[in-house]
Amino acid sequence: MNKKNGMILLMSACTILTLPACETTKEKMGLTRHTPDEFMVMKRAPLEMPDDMKSLPKPRPGLSRPQEVEATLQAKQAIMGGEVTKSVTPSGAEQKLLAKAGAQNTNNDIRTIVNKEAVDGEKDTRPVIKKLLNIGDDTPAATILDPTKEAERIQNNKKAGSPVTTGKTPTLQE
């Protein structure tokens, strides 16, 4: 074996030995393990076979399974423990805690209110410090010219032989 072939063989051996160290190469070769995300797994209700086949309701495509528990209810069950229904009323201890915290008058439609405030907040273009501290006036710092009226004013000044700066500059706010 000559020196050139030996060098090529050594370079290819080094490449083959270091290639599996690359993460993407491992994935392409199928050497990585793919485990399911435990937060994305939802429990499905078991299939049930009734004793009397005649009592089965007619299937209606598109409807959810009646024995299926919604994902939000599953999350509440996991956090609160026990059986949770859709209309959760606070227990006596929770009501006392809410009363001591001063939260007797809670609004059940808070999500809609928060979303509306977020949309309204996007329309407010004041600087953050003015929004938070409610300081300063809300008048714009610059005035916007009305281009058509300004062009007419300049043309009229030129025809009259007066300086271009003569007269009031028209703005869009007027």
Image (cartoon, helix red, strand yellow):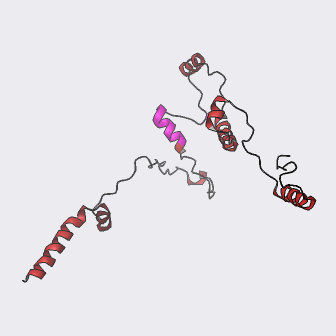
**Residue at the image point whose x is 57% and y is 19% from the top:** 101
Camera-side residue: 68 or 138?
138
The quarter holding residue 90 reads top right
* Rendered view: 12 above or below 73: below
Residue numbers of the magenta segment? 72-87
The quarter holding residue 110 reads top right
**Residue at the image point whose x is 40% and y is 47% from the top:** 38
Q: Tell me residue 139's x, y (percent).
A: 75, 38
Camera-side residue: 131 or 100?
131
Whether residue 73 sits left or right of residue 32 in the image: it is right
Whether residue 156 sits left or right of residue 83 in the image: it is right
Whether residue 95 sits left or right of residue 136 in the image: it is left
Tell me how many marks there are.
0
- The question of residue 88 being in magenta is answered with no
* Rendered view: 22 above or below 134: below
Camera-side residue: 3 or 37?
3
- The question of residue 82 being in magenta is answered with yes
